[in-house]
Image (cartoon, coloured by chain):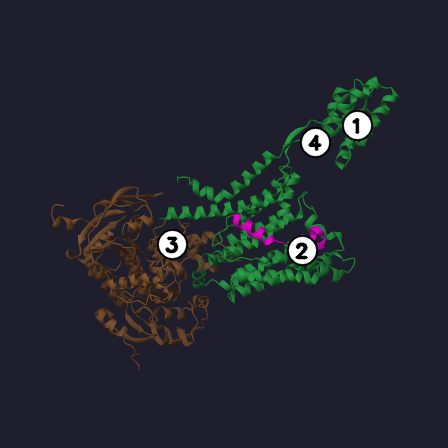
Chain colours: A brown, B green
Amino acid sequence: MPNTDAASKIPLLRMRGIRKSFPGVKALKGVDLTLYHGEVLALLGENGAGKSTLIKILGGAHQPDEGVIEINNQPANVSTPQASQASGIGIIYQEFNLIPFLSVRENIFLGQEPKFISLIQKTKEEIIAKKLFDRIGIKIPIDTECNALSVAHQQIVEIAKTLAQDARIIVMDEPSAALSPRETKGLFKVIKELKSQGIGIIYISHRLDEIFKISDRITFLRDGQYIDTLKTKEISRNKVIELMVGRSIKNEFPKRNTNIGETRLKVSELSQGKRVQKVSFEIKSGEVVGLTGLVGAGRTETARLLFGAETKDSGDIELDGKLLSIKNPRDAIQQNICLLTEDRKSQGLILTQTIRENFSLPNLLQFCSWSFIRKKDESEALSFYVDQIKMKITSTEQIANTLSGGNQQKVVLSKWLQRNAEVIIFDEPTRGIDVGAKYEIYQLINQLTKKGKAILMISSELPEILGMSDRVLVMNEGHITGEIQNPSNATQEDVMRLATKSKPTSA
Amino acid sequence: MKNFNYIQFLFDYGTLIVLVGLCFLFSYVTIEEQSPASTTSAELLAKVIKKDLTENNNIIVLARQGSEGKKFAEILTKKLIQYGINVHQTIVGQPADARKALINFGTSGSKLHGIAADKHMASFAGSNIGKISETFPNLSQTIIFQPNSYNWPNFLKRENLLNVMKQISVVAIIAIGMTMIIITAGIDLSVGSLIALSGVITALAIQSLGGDSPAMWHLWLGAIAGALVCGIIGMLTGGLVTIFRIPAFIATLGIMFIAKGLAFIFSESAPIPIANEAFGWLGRGRTFFGLPNSVILMLTLFFLAHILMNRTSIGRYIYAVGGNPEAARLSGVPVKWVLVFVYTLTGVLAGLGGVMEASLHITGDPKSGDLVELKVIAAVVVGGTSLAGGQGRIFGTLIGAFIIAVINNGMNLTGIESHMQKVIYGSVILIAVLIDQLKIHLMKLKKY
């Protein structure tokens, strides 16, 4: 080696000219990626840009058609997930791969238990596990069952697992998606710690705030093509969005000119156990009320109670002055309340069915005569929304599973739009959705307010909550701890102050 | 023009291709020389004889014993007399009878111009006429007429094909309900026991209503009672699965034992005869176009179920509940009612199966229906319905049932012994599931 300077410039990971086609789709058209030791590289792109395919190739789940992958200037073998792990690559997917009823320790060493004459050496495992958590800087009791851990801690266990496999490259796919702001801060601490140990991290997220906070460089992908790699410090937020979507977006949140009218939805003292306690609020005609708080504060639970997805202990729900009786989601839908769930894959869609079938599920009776479905009417109604909300689909008979996140969310939207409900609850409407599709969803919310609908929007993304709502309610520990009347002038710190307050304001 | 997707085609119609392939296979291996003994072949043979012989020639008609032979001989004789040929004698019987007749004729001394015989008698006559004509030269110029033989697979005979369908009709009808249950990601192990229970209850009801000579309406009431009781039990199963959230496997396992036990208790462990042959209408009768009534019922029910699953809201709900029960619930689908519906319907269909089985034997037998639940599940799975729920088609199940029936029938025709049959049977089920897995795998690859 000529000198130490050059040695330090040897990239930890280098992927060059990666191409990958699937039947009918060119997913990657020659992508380059370089990752150095002790660096956080953000991988940015809209849904369908090829990020997941690239990561799956790195993880050995897919084989590239063309291209070179090198680790420390040596050709790397990533032909199978096992080979990829052995090459020092650890991937933490959005869906964790932990076995719920095994302990933290057992999960960390799953498949690579230290053995002595085929007996597992528990003590050795304990010592190594403790060392790993010391390296990460967070203490987790190693004999807890994994299903007893919070999502944030499960993530730490995943990280420990990759470290136990001696990973030098860690890929994190949307690691903050299910974390509260505080937990995300904790995660960043861990990432910085790993960085200082020379580990290279590829960080995938749609949250630009986080990208700016944590990453050193950003690699942009668009439509399977490599666009550019830039230093994070040297570019602006608008430039980032432009590079991602390929056009400039003036505002992240579209302006709204709606007259707010009479009170439509009135919720009084809604309660269920400790999770939701005496929650009261009103939503007026044409108003967007934001509901936020840390994860577990009771936001989603409140929405589910309103929608009848869970049974409330007490409390009244009135719409336009009429008391509603809601025992299950069917009642709520019939009384003009609908809920776009936070998890569209497990709660919003039937992934094995077509777009048309998903679309008409809550609307089936209006397409039926004598309980026979009029398929023609169904398709016609759907094609209206395909144009209106710009679903990018090849046919209405496409299976929901094959759509990108943004388009899946649009399918969910279309089914509730057809329902024409008066109260629409959006629970994390833009989670995991790219910037372009986010903007379209915001526009749609604005259109709904013009029709005089009452809208409740739950979100963990504070810029979104502050940018989109007319009023913001903040929850903590099952209570509403405060209200922000004029969100456009409020700061994220104002929200956080309320979100961590333990007693309700009325007390 | 879109590219034709071969993989998709193969998976959409794969089971059908397997069925057709099996039919070809069994047709090929069961090809045999057929001696036609039918009406038409007798008429054809008479025409041939008319051409070769002249009026008032003497002829003897020989046919082997049995109703087929008798009919053949009757028609042949009638035709030959019409053509003015002198039919000396018509023998339907054993070769010994034929020999006796020929010797009798020989002693008469007049010339025998021909023998008209079916295949068996012709071969007998052919090998013996030489010896007889040594003693009786008046037989030395006798021509033996026999119908032309031809090759045809035993499998593809009309009777055999109808038999295949008839034998599987009970399993197939219950498989309709089972398909719906499996699409909702459930299972029902109790259907076999319900067959026995339904048969016993039907027979008991008929016995207690009509005594020794039950009238038609007693039979109807009995059948309805059998189906109804099973429907109620199915509804109960649905309740256990939905309200008490007992896994379907366990709930129906319990019901399976209970129903079987009740069938034996009610019948006091002995088959109960039904004292009116008219009850056999459903299981044995052939009212329309010579098709077995059970087959017509089966095809009708499959057609109705197809419409239910593809054109009605309840069908759509069944798929939705199987695909994702939580998403379905949050879309306002009455998930519990849908589940109760499919279990109740399956109960009714199993009850109907019991009535059909009782009708076939004109007996309510507590031992009937053993292991039928496994055949039913096999038919559904072979038909391409995924045990994971959410996917499957009614006509796939019909094809699955046919595949099982054809394998059974084909193995019987080719004389494969019963233990080997089980091995092959099991292998086919495994192959079907493997294909299903391969399909899921390929779908994933396509999805990226």
Residue A409 lies, in percent from the top left, at 35, 58
The answer to whether tags 1 and 2 share a subunit is yes
Q: Is residue A250 above or below residue B146?
A: below
Q: Which residue lies under the disc numbered 3?
A: A384
Q: Secondary structure at mark 1?
A: strand
Q: Residues within 10 Å of mark 3 (few under 14, many from 20)?
A: few
Callout 4 touching callout 3 (CB < 8 Å): no
Mark 2 to mark 3 CA distance (whole Å):
59 Å
Kindly give the residue lying farthest to the right in the view shown.
B108
Badge 2 amino acid: Lys
Q: Which residue lies under the disc numbered 2?
A: B367
Q: Is residue B416 left or right of residue B244?
A: right
Q: Which residue lies under the disc numbered 1?
A: B61
- Observer-side mark, 2 or 3, equals 2
Q: Residues within 10 Å of mark 4 (few under 14, many from 20)?
A: some
Mark 4 to mark 3 CA distance (whole Å):
65 Å
Q: Secondary structure at mark 4?
A: loop
- Observer-side mark, 4 or 3, equals 4
Callout 1 touching callout 2 (CB < 8 Å): no
Mark 4 to mark 1 CA distance (whole Å):
16 Å
The answer to whether tags 3 and 1 share a subunit is no
Is B117 colored magenta in this rendering? no
Q: Secondary structure at mark 3?
A: helix
Badge 1 amino acid: Val
Callout 2 touching callout 3 (CB < 8 Å): no
Is B372 colored magenta in this rendering? yes
Q: Is residue B262 visible?
A: yes
Residue A339 lies, in percent from the top left, at 38, 65
Q: Which residue lies under the disc numbered 4?
A: B36
Identify the magenta region: B357-383
Badge 3 amino acid: Phe
- Observer-side mark, 4 or 2, equals 2
